[in-house]
Image (cartoon, rainbow, N blue to C red):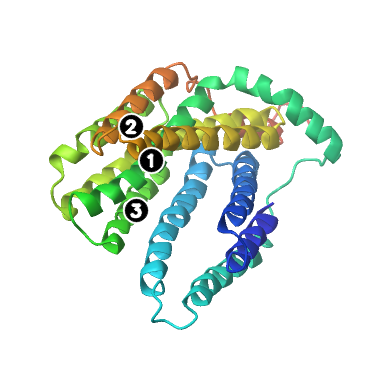
Amino acid sequence: LFVVSCAGVAIGCLVTVWISPFLIALLVGVAYGAACAARGKVIPLIARATMRSSTMVSGFINASLVIGLLAGTVLGTVLGEKLGNAQVENAILWRHGILFVFMLIATTLGFLVRPPEPPPIPFARGMRDLVGGTLETMRAHWALLVSGGLAWGIASAASLAVFIDGVDRLHIQPTQASFMALFAAMGAILGNLASHWFRRLWHTLASLAVLGVCVLIYPYVIHHWLAAAFMMIVVGASFAAPANVLDARLMSLTGAAGIAGRGSTVMSLVHNIFILAVGTGLALPLLMGWMKPEQQFWFMAMVAVISILVASRANLRDDDPALSVRRKEQPTIPAIGSGEG
């Protein structure tokens, strides 16, 4: 899945030069969805094999994901600005050629990803189980899925909202505004890596509350790009920590049940649905003039409140199944004088 996903994006980056970008956007979206499913599936497998908590493993993987997503925003902005004018000969070929080479490297690295796989099952049976078990998974873990999806929706919408706010209100250059994503990435990395120390339910609820307060007050207290950069670090950390705890808990439970693939697929599906829903909920009112730019931050704060209410129903109290299952498999050494062995 990693190899096919990266190769699909590489092809999409190149053929966009000659084919409609809307068609290629669909191809890239499908490839990205496959990578998200693979990313979720490896979490319980690596956690069980390395005797590390699912939250820690997920934290490292999600930190890498955030770096890629947000650094890609900066790379795309820089390429568009530096190679986006007619004065550069073959500018479009240079732009897409650089992205194509970048994704070729990613495709090559995909061959090195070899997590400990569970026993394989026939594709047809897997599809039947996926279709039949998706609703069951949603019913059993709806709080984890919905609260995590809402958090990802807020983060995605906030990244774009801060970029637009930086250009329109703070009057900074688009390239400089895109670098706000790097500060958000710094915070997200810290939040992901520290999340395994903050796995209690109240930690998750408090972090989501901080996220909601930050996006609510952002347009009223931020008047300089340095303050915006600091705020984005806080926003990134307060999003990543609870989102990683919720996602890791879901993958740990589904992995212990032997349905890591189904769990990761459903998680990826729900996340992207909420990213689309929150983004559309902001884009349409702004486009139609029904919402002022600063009101989009109110909307995201309201979504944060909903995520807190949903997350309060999630079960984060039990031990990590990825560790408990592995401990049961460890051979026991009989005590001296026990007569065993």
| The quarter of the displayed image where residue 119 is located | top right
Question: Which disc, if any, is residue 78?
Answer: none
The residue that disc 3 covers is: 181
Amino acid type of disc 2? Met
Nearer to me, 315 or 67: 67
Question: Which disc, if any, is residue 157?
Answer: 1
- Residue at 82% in and 42% down: 120
- Residue at 42% in and 30% down: 199
Residue 234 appears in the figure: yes
Proximity of marks 2 and 1: CB atoms separated by less than 8 Å: yes
The image shows residue 265 at horizontal and vertical percentages of 65, 36
Amino acid type of disc 1? Ala
Amino acid type of disc 3? Ala
Q: Nearer the viewer, mark 3 or mark 2?
A: 2
| The quarter of the displayed image where residue 309 is located | top left
Proximity of marks 3 and 2: CB atoms separated by less than 8 Å: no
Q: Nearer the viewer, mark 1 or mark 3?
A: 1
The image shows residue 142 at horizontal and vertical percentages of 55, 21
The image shows residue 249 at horizontal and vertical percentages of 53, 30
Dot 1 lies on which element? Answer: helix
Q: Between marks 3 and 2, how big is the CA–CA gap?
A: 17 Å
The residue that disc 2 covers is: 300
| The quarter of the displayed image where residue 267 is located | top right
The image shows residue 314 at horizontal and vertical percentages of 48, 20
In the image, taking residue 200 as reference, residue 28 lies left or right, namely right
Q: Mark 2 or 1 closer to N-term? A: 1
Q: Mark 3 or 2 closer to N-term? A: 3
Neighbourhood count class around disc 3 (C-alpha, 10 Å): few under 14, some 14–19, many 20 upward: many
Dot 2 lies on which element? Answer: helix
Q: Between marks 2 and 1, how big is the CA–CA gap?
A: 8 Å
Q: Residue furthest front?
A: 288
